[in-house]
């Protein structure tokens, strides 16, 4: 489209209102501008096209043949724009919320709570897309990401949802009823760690845990780590938020006191306006944390 061949959109809007309502005064009231502003826009259009579009017949305003042709085209065009805008608004307010998070967080934190949201807000359709990859919210069409980190993601807004306190845990099948253990004793047991997660290594060093002194098995995902530690294959470092049910049920036992870290789980959104459904979901999440 060559925009240089198209006159001012404000002028086209003013002329369309004049043609539809039958005069400058009615158009001015409709667009909440002055009579003079409408007249100026229409005269500018006539100058642009070098042709008369309207003429006065007694006390009424009439359209020339050229004016009728332009008015018909504008009414059709603006009508299509109105339909498109209304459809997009309807889509934005009714489409499912798209939420991404890690598979481990989805399974161990979100799913045990999600039934409450569905019960309270059956009108809001929610689509969860667990992924270990860092999602680009705009590119991937996500409304919300729940991310683990320090909350410093440039270009996005973030809000801390829950802390990421961590602890060393093991299953009763591996450690029996020993409860809390010394670091030296833990070095003699096998360890289970997720690949490419450096935070737990850093935390372990601060606690005197040296993985070079222990047998370590690495897994691609934390879900696999959790399955293995529950089965009694070794010890693991886990965020408390992800193993609450295991601790309550006794499936896993804490071996070292919980330590607070600067890391946490954050609600990450794009900057700007949030839909009403997203605002409702975030409010619910805050109550759950």
Image (cartoon, grey):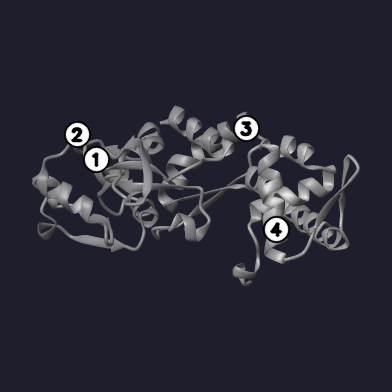
Q: In the image, is residue 57 above or below residue 192?
A: above
Cβ atoms under marks 1 and 2 closer than 8 Å: yes
Residue found farthest to the right? 58
- Judge whether residue 12 can be spotted in this image: no
Cβ atoms under marks 3 and 2 closer than 8 Å: no
Quarter of the picture containing the N terminus is bottom right
Q: Earlier in the sequence, mark 3 or mark 1?
A: 3
Near mark 2 (Cα within 10 A), the count class, few <14, some 14-19 or many ≥20, is few
Task: State the SS at label 1.
Answer: strand
Q: Tell me the mark number nearer the camera, choosing from 4 and 3.
A: 4
- Residue that badge 1 annotates: 167
Q: Earlier in the sequence, mark 4 or mark 3?
A: 4
Cβ atoms under marks 4 and 2 closer than 8 Å: no
- Between residue 85 and residue 221, name the one nearer to us: 85
- Residue that badge 4 annotates: 45
Q: In the image, is residue 213 above or below residue 99?
A: below
- Residue that badge 3 annotates: 121
């Amino acid at each position: 489209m060559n925009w240089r061949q198209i006159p001012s959109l404000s002028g086209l809007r003013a002329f369309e209102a004049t043609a539809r309502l039958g005069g400058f005064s009615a158009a001015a009231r409709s667009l909440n501008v002055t009579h003079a502003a409408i007249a100026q826009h229409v005269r500018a259009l006539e100058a642009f096209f070098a042709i008369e579009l309207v003429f006065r017949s007694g006390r009424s305003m009439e359209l020339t043949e050229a004016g009728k042709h332009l008015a018909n085209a504008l009414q059709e065009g603006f009508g299509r724009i109105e339909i498109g805008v209304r459809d997009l608004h309807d889509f934005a307010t009714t489409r499912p919320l798209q939420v991404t998070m890690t598979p481990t967080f989805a399974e161990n934190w979100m799913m045990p709570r999600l039934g409450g949201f569905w019960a309270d807000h059956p009108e809001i359709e929610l689509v969860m897309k667990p992924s270990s990859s860092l999602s680009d919210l705009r590119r991937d069409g996500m409304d919300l990401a729940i991310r683990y980190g320090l909350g410093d993601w440039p270009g996005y807004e973030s809000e801390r949802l829950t802390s990421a306190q961590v602890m060393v845990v093991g299953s009763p099948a591996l450690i029996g009823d020993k409860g809390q253990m010394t670091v030296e004793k833990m070095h003699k047991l096998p360890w289970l760690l997720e690949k490419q997660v450096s935070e737990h290594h850093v935390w372990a060093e601060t606690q005197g845990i040296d993985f070079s002194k222990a047998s370590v098995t690495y897994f691609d995902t934390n879900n696999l780590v959790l399955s293995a530690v529950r089965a009694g294959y070794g010890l693991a470092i886990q965020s408390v938020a992800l193993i609450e049910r295991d601790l309550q049920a006794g499936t896993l036992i804490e071996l070292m006191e919980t330590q607070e870290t600067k890391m946490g789980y954050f609600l990450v959104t794009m900057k700007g306006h949030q839909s009403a459904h997203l605002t409702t979901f975030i409010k619910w999440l805050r109550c759950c944390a």
